[in-house]
Amino acid sequence: MEHIITPKVEYVKLLNKYAEKKSALGTLYLTATHLIYVEQTNNARTETWVLHHHIVSVEKLPLTASGCPLLIRCKTFQLLHLLFQRERDCQDVYQSLLRLSQPVKEEELYAFLYNPHQNEEDRRQGWEFISVANDFSRMGLSNDYWEISHLNKNYEICSTYPSILGLPKNASVAVVTGSAKFRSRGRLPVLSYYHKDTKAAICRCSQPLSGLTSRCVEDEQMLQAISQANPNCPFIYVVDTRPKLNAMANRAAGKGYENEDNYSNIRFQFQGIENIHVMRNSLQKLLEVCSMKSSMSDYLTGLENSGWLRHIKSVMDAGMFLAKAVCEERASVLVHCSDGWDRTAQVCSLACILLDPYYRTIKGLMVLIEKEWISFGHKFSHRCGHLDTDPKEVSPVFTQFLECVWQLSEQFPCVFEFNEHYLIEIHNQVYACQYGNFIGNCQKERLDMRLHEKTFSLWPHLLKNQHLYRNPLYRRSLESTVLRPSTLPLHFKFWCGMYNHYDRGMHPKQSVLDQLLSLTQKQEEGERTMTELQRQLAVADGVLPDPSGPINTPTEQDSPSEKTPTAPFVQSNGSCLPLVNGDAEEAGPGAEKCIDKEGAEPGATEHDLTSSEDKPVSVETEHSKEEVQESS
Amino acid sequence: MEFAELIKTPRVDGVVLHRPFMPTVEGTLCLTGHHLILSSRQDNTEELWLLHANIDSIEKRFVGSLGTIIVKCKDLRVIQLDIPGMEECLNIASSIEALSTLDSVSLMYPFFYRPLFEVIEDGWQLFVPEEAFKDLESMVLFYPWNETTLFGLPKEDEEDNIALWSAESAFTVDEAVMMRAAQPLTGTNGRRCKEDEKLINATLCAGKRGYIIDTRTIAVAQQAKTRGGGFEQEANYPQWRRIHKAIERSNVLQDSLIKLVEACNDQSHSMDRWLSKLEASNWQSKVKEILTTACLAAQCIDREGASVLVHGTEGTDSTLQVTSLAQIILDPACRTIRGFEVLIEREWLQAGHPFQQRCAQSAYSNGKPRSEAPVFLLFLDCVWQILRQFPCSFQFNENLLIMFFEHAYASQFGTFLGNCVAERVKLQLSQKTVSLWSWVNRPQELERFLNPLYEPNNLVIWPSVAPQSLLLWEGVFLRWNRSTKCLDEACQEMVHIIEYNKELQNKVNSLRRQLAQLETEDSPLQTP
């Protein structure tokens, strides 16, 4: 609080960049965590809340006749243009925000203050909810070829890697440690994803310290071990995601890339994704373009000059290369860039989404982010600029990953369980530091900060609100397919929902997604009402005992009363289950809890009562039939 | 002339057809007077029936004795035919060339086409002008002028091209009208026409304002004076304010379309090259330009209650884009299928948009363009942009727009033949051809065009014209360059959700009734 000079300023104008006339007049409040702008017009009160952590820059613009302007840019791509009447107020707010938006110490981050009214047990469970170890077992580890290793449990082999690693079974400790010494920051080749069907693996690491001539027998053996862990293919791909020129420049500094002559049976490949600095500048240019009121021609030229979509395409191309190698050639792939925590994370996680439908679910995406990004040491604190540190470390690497997922969802509208809001919410949360997940640069750092004791995990919060993030068009039946997106330039679009998120006027005025989401909700209500009506009807018919009557009914009436007469209703999106309720009285509004129950059998709705003569015509759609068949 | 003279080889066996995203088909190629047909003669494979009129241009290639013809269609599709035998290939190519460039309208397919369906509602009788101007007649009663003054007074314009449209069907005192015309023939020495001034000024009651939206820049309008055209002098039309809002003339549009389609079809280029070609085509700029002007016209009417007169030079191209789009923005009736048909009939066909000239060639034409221009396609693109931004406000879906695009360029129906009403009457289209409306309005066909999300609303719908809000119309321009499997699935799923919801509501209602009935039946028993 000590940084807030003036907690409240009245008569502040919030400028509307598209329509000067529509600018609002209101009151600005500064709290310890938020900037709040309250606009009071007649009987409507609108509040704009901006988290201090979301503010990327505060800029005082030259004085104008109408007042002192202050321009606030956010990491969420929100742009606030305020106009103060008094220079003094403007200066005070400016200084306060400068300080508030750039915390110096970790403890100043919101997550250390924030308490979502959970007890310690909830907190613990929240942190355990997403587990990388579980995902390894889901992939089928350990097996004949791969094992889960605890060699790094004290972060001694690699300080920026997680404590558990997936390693080829036939790699000895000497090979593992030797290989780690030959890789930048000890980031040795380890398993990222194991593809059960083909036995091919995606592995990740950092660049080798090969320089111009160096080689390392253990590292060569390590790659050999990875290759041998795949009985279906005699070679592995080694993918350097950097442009060749960058990789070559690194050789002079004693780093570099694998020499095909030294490694047996590798196929080496560059992918040409640019580095974090290029990406940062590219986003900068993109944001300039989309914050300007420009002509179509300037916009398209600006879009081209920003290079943003070109970079997105390069990430997508690399992800596609991996997925193709695994599913078509059944070949394992080893991926690296320089340190193996930016481009490598993008490419590996994207390939996982292309290959495995699990990562296209709401929970699966959490697992993927936890695995490929958080635990493998993507430097969230540095890349997001959580603290006032080196601005050259900031880069929208994770944003690009989310965009790639969005581009995929545009090409495949039915294969993701989540919608666009989910991606945007995750993006906002990454920068918000409200939850502890994205604080720190690697697992060891987070452990040292005792984040699990001091902060809460984001994932349970997202899961609680998952109804907002569902894709109504999601079809589970399509899930087993490997995605093969087109990566032709013309299939990449500008993501208006992200970069112009706060320019509501630019978005479609009617949203198909919202419309369908409300329909799904209506559907759930309708199904509930129907179950209740059918029960009442059965009671009125005398088939069911009146629940208001005595509870101790004779035994022969017991069995029908346990099963509610439900038509075989299955949500058309297949994501929800029919209302299976033992107790008819609970079929009312309290029945939500049944909806998310996992693994219940749709077949359990097999109803006997509705087979009587006066049964209501059951609404059987093709889909529900399918579902019933599947489950039986 | 007999078609047989033009068909040198009517039939070739062993022809292989290549289409993007579809399996190749081997079969027999037949040429008829109006169609190119390829059939594998197997039950399960679809036959290709291509109207010669749909062929924009062809290319020939030879490898040994195997000839290849690349057929580029006006609907932007590109197909490849591998024809064994050089002579056959040459014959087929020259026949196609001849048949697809027939000069005489009366040789066009619509004059030969006999519908396989029963015409229940004759489209030619659907939109007679009296019907289309029904609103107008009632307005004439209201306004201080009568029908004779309206139609009888020739405006001294290049054409007698006047039409009125009312902003709302229910009339209020604040009623504003939208009119279109051609430029006035003021010439360099500022010629005046009393009758024109009287007519234009009579539109406005005392104290009301009006806007003349000239779709040319002031410089172009000035230049037009040297050729006898010009614009309204404000002194002579005191209640009117003139606004110049430039929309590209039709002659540059064709070039824009050609560039856009070329960019869309070239799959080899990098992201930068694609974006720069998209920009260079200028197509999206035109979409923005037209929508902006249409919004301006609509704004004058809706926000200011002012009347609007739109004109460019002839009043048959950019003028129509503006007036028809403004109506879609303002009038919910135009967003229904029937209303949209009325709009096309009134604002395009009756208004004399020269369809035959404008749509003679499409994006693959090699020759020097004469008067071809994708004016109508641009209009459809703009409608699609509004539809995308208001996906619940239209009774129809994208398919209807694409269908209109196809039929404007090549059709079995006579609707888009000719260049104006007079020409159509002379051609006796209504007697000799079938109307597109007769076909579209059949319930079986309509189903394909219905938007499942449609919820009628009476709102004025203002589209965003920010560059970020205007997308490339993939349904037309990438139609043949992408697989639509996933998008089709999404559509089906959406329809399924909506249908299922309806069923569910019906079911709940019927259960409610059943229950109510049971309760009333039961009650006498319970009270002895």
Image: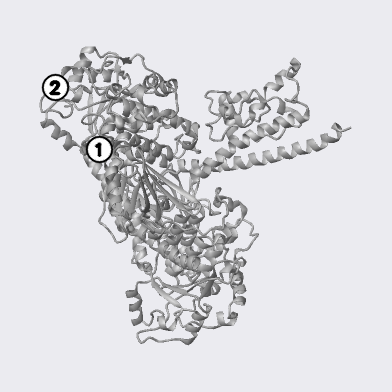
Question: Which residue type does callout 2 highlight?
Answer: Arg
Instruction: Using the image, name the chain to which the residue with label 1 belongs.
Output: A
Q: Secondary structure at mark 2?
A: loop
Q: Secondary structure at mark 1?
A: loop
The residue tagged 1 is A394
Q: Is residue B317 visible?
A: no
State the separation of the CA atoms marked 2 and 1.
Answer: 33 Å
* Badge count: 2
State if disc 1 and disc 2 touch (CB < 8 Å): no
Q: Which mark is residue A215?
A: 2
Q: Position of residue B458 (x, y in %)?
A: 56, 58
Give the residue displayed 53% in from the left and 78% down from the top: B205
Q: Earlier in the sequence, mark 2 or mark 1?
A: 2
Q: Is residue B491 visible?
A: yes
Q: As drawn, is B43 to the left or to the right of A564? A: left
Q: As drawn, is A293 to the left or to the right of A215? A: right
Q: Is residue B145 above or below residue A56?
A: below
Instruction: Using the image, name the chain to which the residue with label 2 belongs.
Output: A
Residue B442 vs residue A502, the one in the foreground: A502
Task: Name which quarter of the figure residue A236 lies in.
Answer: top left
Task: Name which quarter of the figure residue B112 lies in.
Answer: bottom right
Give the residue displayed 53% in from the left and 73% down from the top: B164
Q: Position of residue A194 (x, y in %)?
A: 35, 23
Q: Quadrant of the C terminus of chain B?
A: top right
Bin the neighbour count of mark 1 within 10 Å (Cα to Cα): few under 14, some 14-19, many 20 and up: many
Is the same chain shared between marks 2 and 1?
Answer: yes
Q: As drawn, is A537 to the left or to the right of B15? A: right
Question: Which residue type does callout 1 highlight?
Answer: Val
